[in-house]
């Protein structure tokens, strides 16, 4: 079978934003391990506000904890969302939800590496994969997440527009065995932003997983319930 070359030129162009993969990472020099630690990379052809090591962190984190429900606040361009969607669809061992308040800005914007068009196809075929264009602070979102947290061992990833507010709203839902993490730790969210919630609900940094993220510059900070 000879494939139709016109398909590669059909539809909207898929972009190559210089802020995601700088030329110096792939031209005229050897890629090193340190390059894996840069934040804002392209993963599977889409934009991702993570570094590459974050993917390995999530792989090990899920393998260790076997979460049954994973929820992401802040889909943005969708590369990380698509990673979780593929993991959910392949394993069929957990449900994945992602929430973005405005999908038009990046999610469906292919010139800036949006991956929403592919995520929607995955969700069409798999009951384990879902995306919502909703405010994470709306009652409908909170009630949806709360109902699922009550049923399933859960991991919540706060990476939307107000990570501290997301943590402070959703961290009190944690049960023993659940986890919550924030992105951009030390840049957009600090311990002082969430200290009152941590004190009230006995939420503490998640042991050696914190060290792993600090070592590789993922800017991810995971938390659990204290003993």
Image (spheres, rainbow, N blue to C red):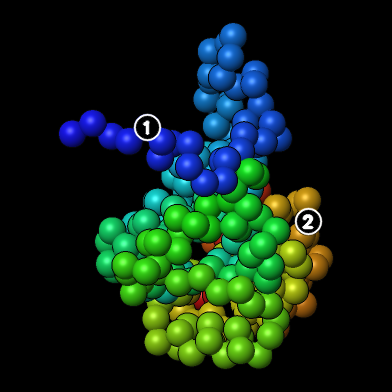
Q: Secondary structure at mark 1?
A: helix
In the picture as drawn, the residue positioned furthest to the right comes out as 192
Q: Who's the residue at 76% across and 51% down the image?
A: 186
Q: Which of the pair 67/131 is nearer the observer?
A: 131
**Residue annotated with mark 2:** 188
Q: Which of the pair 140/208 is nearer the observer?
A: 140
Q: Who's the residue at 40% across and 87% down the image?
A: 151
Q: Can residue 174 be seen by looking at this rendering?
A: yes
Where on the picture, by quarter, is residue 3?
Answer: top left
Q: Which of the pair 120/79 is nearer the observer?
A: 120
In the rendered image, the quadrant that contains the N terminus is top left
Q: Can residue 215 be seen by looking at this rendering?
A: no
> Disc 2 versus disc 1: distance between alpha carbons?
44 Å
Q: Who's the residue at 78% across and 51% down the image?
A: 187
Of callouts 2 and 1, the N-terminal one = 1
**Residue annotated with mark 1:** 5
Where on the picture, by quarter, is residue 113?
Answer: top right
The picture places residue 182, in percent across and down from the top left corner, at: 64, 61
Left or right: where 165 falls relative to 210: right
């Amino acid at each position: 079978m000879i494939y139709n070359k016109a398909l590669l030129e059909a539809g909207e162009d898929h972009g190559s934003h210089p802020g995601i993969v700088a030329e110096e990472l792939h031209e005229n020099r050897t890629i090193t391990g340190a390059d894996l630690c840069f934040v804002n990379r392209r993963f599977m052809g889409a934009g991702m506000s993570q570094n590459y090591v974050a993917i390995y962190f999530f792989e090990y984190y899920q393998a260790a904890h076997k979460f049954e429900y994973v929820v992401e606040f802040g889909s943005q361009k969708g590369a990380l969302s698509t990673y979780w969607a593929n993991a959910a669809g392949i394993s069929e061992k957990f449900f994945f939800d992602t929430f973005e308040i405005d999908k038009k800005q990046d999610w469906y914007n292919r010139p800036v590496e949006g991956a929403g068009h592919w995520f929607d196809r995955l969700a069409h075929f798999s009951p384990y994969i879902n995306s919502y264009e909703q405010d994470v602070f709306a009652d409908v979102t909170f009630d949806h997440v709360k109902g699922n947290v009550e049923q399933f061992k859960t991991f919540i990833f706060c990476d939307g527009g107000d990570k501290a507010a997301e943590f402070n709203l959703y961290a009190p839902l944690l049960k023993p065995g659940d986890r919550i993490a924030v992105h951009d730790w030390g840049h957009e969210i600090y311990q002082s932003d969430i200290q009152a919630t941590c004190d009230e609900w006995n939420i503490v940094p998640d042991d050696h997983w914190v060290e792993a993220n600090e070592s590789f510059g993922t800017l991810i900070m995971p938390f659990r319930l204290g003993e």
